[in-house]
Amino acid sequence: MKKLINDPTYVVEEMLDGYVKAHPNYIKVLPENDRALVTARTTREGKVGVLIGGGSGHEPGFLGYVGDGMADGVAVGNIFASPPPAPILEVTKAIDKGAGVVYLYGNYAGDVMNFGMAAELAEMEGINVEMVLGNDDVASAPKEEKHRRRGIAGELFVFKTAGAAADLGYNLEDVARIARKANENTRSMGVGLTPCSLPQTGKPSFELGEDEMEIGLGHHGEPGIRKAKLQKADIVADELVAAILEDMPLNEGEEVAVLVNGLGSTPRMELYIMFRKAEQILREKGIKIYRSYVGDYITSLEMGGCSITIIKLDGELKTMLDYPADCPMFVQK
């Protein structure tokens, strides 16, 4: 498994260095910690700070979403690993404008521990912190144990809505409320086709046969619901959407946004074929797609496969989704 890297030990540092040099008008590294990055643009006093973060290897998540209308800063971990508390705290201090900071991150043990520790340290320094965990993956735990579910591509909608609310001048409690509302109304389901490889090992992160797929595979290669023979795109999309609608029933006339997210090596051709079927299923049920997103938004290095995410919308969430955003890897006018 080939990679264009130098020393595997320094892939994250070299990526961040290249990223900041490519987008100096958007983002900068804090001198206190090279894994703490913040917007290069001036933010107003009294604005709620939005901090996102997680492991590397998911680009454009998470560092690609620092910019106007979305996050003010990001804490970056090693590949598929949580950032430690230190960079989270440094970003918190840098983006606090007197109105507090909301932490947005996925429901993984390391993230829960490290963001929690950083929040305690921030509170000790007089900064109010709210935390919202993404847990949209319906494959990772049954409905009655939703608190155990992991966050995958649906986190994009949490970032987008919270960032808009903060930009619109909402207070800390309301920014967190909107982020939780987005998360509560979001469900995702994925399929894995081929593994990725970590730069340090150069070996596949899991095994799948040449003619196999794995339904419900996690973004780090966590086991899914089942392995099966590879099926046609329409059959796979039907299963993914059915799992989402079973978990979050939608009624005729309701509006949603749909995200078909590539995991790193899946061509856009295939993603649009998957979207085509998802749109057909929803249209036949009388469900209107208000906004569509197709592409690589939260990846897993070069993993093959994709996920489908649906967020149920109301007027407030539609306002937040419609709000302009300008980030290096996400622009919405």
Image: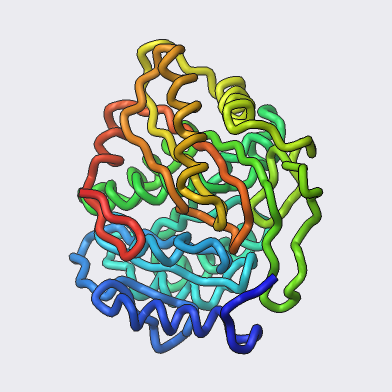
Query: How many tags in the picture?
Result: 0
- In the picture, measured across the screen, residue 199 lies left or right of residue 28, that is right
In the image, residue 217 sits, relative to residue 204, either above or below, namely above
Q: Is residue 107 visible?
A: yes
Closest to the observer, 159 or 268: 268
Say which residue appears at 45% left-offset and 53% top-offset: 297
Closest to the observer, 294 or 233: 233
Say which residue appears at 70% left-offset and 67% top-offset: 197
Say which residue appears at 28% left-offset and 52% top-offset: 166
Colouring chosen for the image of the structure: rainbow
Closest to the observer, 48 or 57: 57
Q: Is residue 247 visible?
A: no
Say which residue appears at 47% left-offset and 17% top-offset: 250
| Image spot of residue 230 (x, y percent) | 72, 37
- In the picture, measured across the screen, residue 71 lies left or right of residue 194, that is left
| Image spot of residue 139 (x, y percent) | 68, 36
Closest to the observer, 164 or 198: 198
The quadrant of the image that shows the N terminus is bottom right
- In the picture, measured across the screen, residue 51 lies left or right of residue 224, that is left
In the image, residue 40 sits, relative to residue 265, either above or below, namely below
- In the picture, measured across the screen, residue 107 lies left or right of residue 204, that is left
| Image spot of residue 92 (x, y percent) | 41, 70
In the image, residue 61 sits, relative to residue 200, either above or below, namely above
| Image spot of residue 220 (x, y percent) | 67, 57
Q: Quadrant of residue 3?
A: bottom right
